[in-house]
Amino acid sequence: MASYAVIGLGRFGMTVATILAETGMEVLAIDKDQSLVDAISGKVTQAICMNSTDEDALRNLNLDEMDAVILGIGSNIEESVLTAAILKKIGVGMIHAKVENELHGRILELIGVQRVLLPEKIVGTQLAKTLSSRNILEYLTLTTGLGVMELLAPPEFVGKTLQELALPTTRKINVIAIKYNYLTVTDEGKNLIEQRMNEMPGANDVVNEGDILVLMGKIKDLDNLVDDLAQRKELL
């Protein structure tokens, strides 16, 4: 199981930590504000209140063994830069950092941060991808390089089982849920369509017309799937 540390629990850090935990990852959340730590403690693997510029304290957390550290400190640039420098010093391999502006990002890149994230650009990219195809209902990118996409099942998927589609093996994309319409009848005898979710789809589950597939994978793999379907004129 992948493990991540999220330092800084503002709106960005809180969202990233929560989503990672909900997708089954081990998450260590860190902030110097006890109220924020308390707010997320029940949602992640572990939550700690501490100052991220305390080198000795960071060393004791074995962050160098994590798959990645997400640095969510944005507004306090000095604290962000100092924390990033300490993370590099103690041997953290992969760091993703939220930045306030291009200069902030450039400074972090100079000290070895592999990926800097400007929220406005992220939101713009997600919106553009969502609007680019009528079949993409939602497209979210995570700081880990993963993406989550809601895809209205294209015709070539309909009638096939998940095993026949073989998205995990052929595309390196996992189907983490299927949303579908369910017809019920009210006490008054009226037909009512409810949207339900299969949260643990199995290999033998069949994709039906109108189903919405919730997909997760690397951003490049999701983009490749969308491009390939578009070329077959299934999405556009």
Image (spheres, rainbow, N blue to C red):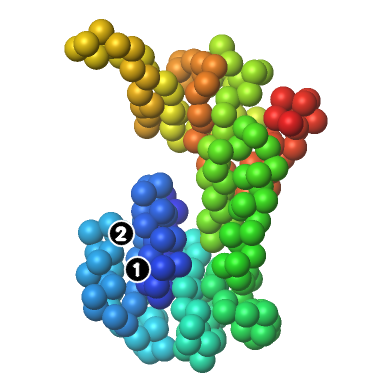
- Dividing the image into 4 quarters, which one contains the C terminus? top right
Q: Which numbered disc covers residue 44?
A: 2
Instruction: Quadrant for residue 14, please give it.
Output: bottom left
The percent coordinates of residue 38 (x first, y second) are 22, 70
The percent coordinates of residue 228 (x first, y second) are 75, 32
Q: Are marks 2 and 1 in contact (CB under 8 Å)?
A: yes
- Furthest residue in direction left, as rendered: 187
Instruction: Quadrant for residue 149, please give it.
Output: top right
Left or right: residue 73 versus residue 129 is left
- Furthest residue in direction top, as rendered: 189
Give the CA separation, mark 2 to mark 1.
Answer: 7 Å
Q: Is residue 205 above or below residue 198?
A: above
Circle 1 residues within 10 Å: few <14, some 14–19, many ≥20: many
Circle 2 residues within 10 Å: few <14, some 14–19, many ≥20: some
The percent coordinates of residue 91 (x first, y second) are 52, 77
The amino acid sitting under disc 1 is Ala
Left or right: residue 187 versus residue 105 is left
